[in-house]
Amino acid sequence: MTRHLLVTGGAGFIGSNFVHHVLGTTDDTVTVLDKFTYAGHRASLAGLPEDRLTVVEGDITDAAVVDRLVGEADAVVHYAAESHNDNSLADPSPFLDTNLIGTYTLLEAARRHDTRFHHISTDEVYGDLALDDPARFTEHTPYNPSSPYSSTKAGSDLLVRAWVRSFGVRATISNCSNNYGPRQHVEKFIPRQITNLIDGIRPRLYGAGLNVRDWIHADDHSSAVLTILADGTIGETYLIGADGEKSNKDVVEQILTLMGHDAGDYDHVTDRAGHDLRYAIDSTKLRTELGWTPSYGSFDTGLAATIDWYRENEDWWRPQKAATEAKYAATGQ
Ligand code: NAD
Ligand code: DAU
């Protein structure tokens, strides 16, 4: 049976990868609701079948538009967020509006219309792990967010849990690790370094660069979300990860090598305030209960393909590059 999905934030990095995945692998139709902030791009949805995709420019805090679109959908997949930690340190205000009030507005509409709801969240709600700790995050790890961004994501998760328990909203939650792949904004770590090298700028590593992130290709994130939407248990949380732990230093060195430079050709810059040390996901629950496995190849293959994408799609990222670097220059990063 085909479904009609409302995808919030579908013009952003992971949301657009999800829309491409859904339209490429199912017969579902999709409405994207996106505010087109600095992080949303119409070009990210170019070339998709027009008879199965509707794009609405609007804000998830606008109760009227949200009520109409949620009422028309069989399910909501909620990606829209302010997503960048560094921006949340400079100005937390839009993070509270979009991540908290926006999620609340969607939940109230899902409650009124009894619409299935899937909430996209992050492993950052759990805080960080020590570099030498063998532990990984599980669904039972206590919440301990560090930044304005991750604290608003943690708050949004708790709203979803409360709306399930108090009002019977049919919701699931997933908390995923760091995504990489095509169409990611150049403010983020991997695209920033790739596009720096294309522009002849040396990569920038925060602090000593020993911080560890657990990388997953955005397409594997999408297949996991479709699996949870189909087979997940209402009220449950699922962690999504692909066993991709790497230090930032290792990633920068790998990018430099793949792009034909000396692995040591990067600079250390001012560290991020409150910088989380290590994220690591144990996705056993998703794999054993719902049978999901990542299908994208190794990080090395995915990184090489991502570099190729940025080399071939300069039109997509070029308009954002100078302003992004100017913002970083102001903080010494
Ligand atoms: P992104 O910043 O690339 O995209 C966010 C999208 O949301 C943009 O298209 C933007 O225009 C839209 N948006 C922002 N505010 C809005 C509003 N008020 N109303 C409607 N649309 C609005 O973000 P991303 O990296 O693709 O992240 C998407 C989701 O996935 C977020 O919820 C994030 O917390 C979560 N997540 C991200 C990662 C990651 O590695 N990037 C990992 C785990 C979870
Ligand atoms: O873990 C999931 C999270 O991953 C998501 O919830 C966030 O939305 C997403 O932005 C990402 O958060 P991070 O803060 O981990 O991602 P970012 O790309 O900003 O940085 C990755 C690491 O690289 C982090 O340790 C900071 C470091 N860094 C970042 C930049 C931009 C650098 O060393 N140099 C840089 O220039």
Image: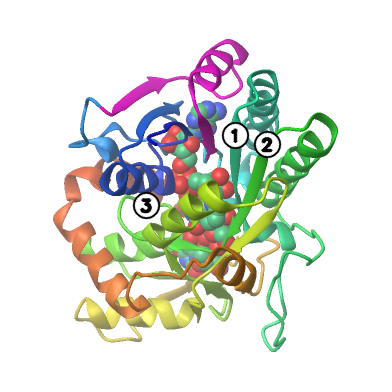
* Whether label 1 touches label 3, CB < 8 Å: no
Residue for badge 2 = 170
* Whether label 3 touches label 2, CB < 8 Å: no
Q: What residue type is labelled 1?
A: Arg
SS label for mark 1: strand
Q: What residue type is labelled 3?
A: Gln
Horizontal side of 60 relative to 219 (left or right) equals: right
Which sits in the foreground, 325 or 4?
4
Determine if the C-beta at disc 3 is less than 8 A from ligand 1: yes
Q: In this view, does 113 lie above or below 144?
A: above
Horizontal side of 199 relative to 122 (left or right) equals: left
- The mark nearer the N terminus, 1 or 3, is 1
Q: Residue 116 carries which label?
A: 1
Q: In which quarter of the image is residue 88?
A: top right
Magenta residues span 52-78
Say if the magenta span includes residue 61.
yes
Tell me the mark number nearer the camera, choosing from 1 and 3: 1
* Whether label 2 touches label 1, CB < 8 Å: yes
Residue for badge 3 = 184
**Which residue appears farthest toward the left when viewing the image?**
312
Q: Position of residue 5 (x, y in %)?
A: 44, 32
- The mark nearer the N terminus, 3 or 2, is 2
Q: For the residues marked 1 and 3, what is the alpha-carbon distance in whole angstroms?
A: 28 Å
Say if the magenta span includes residue 293.
no
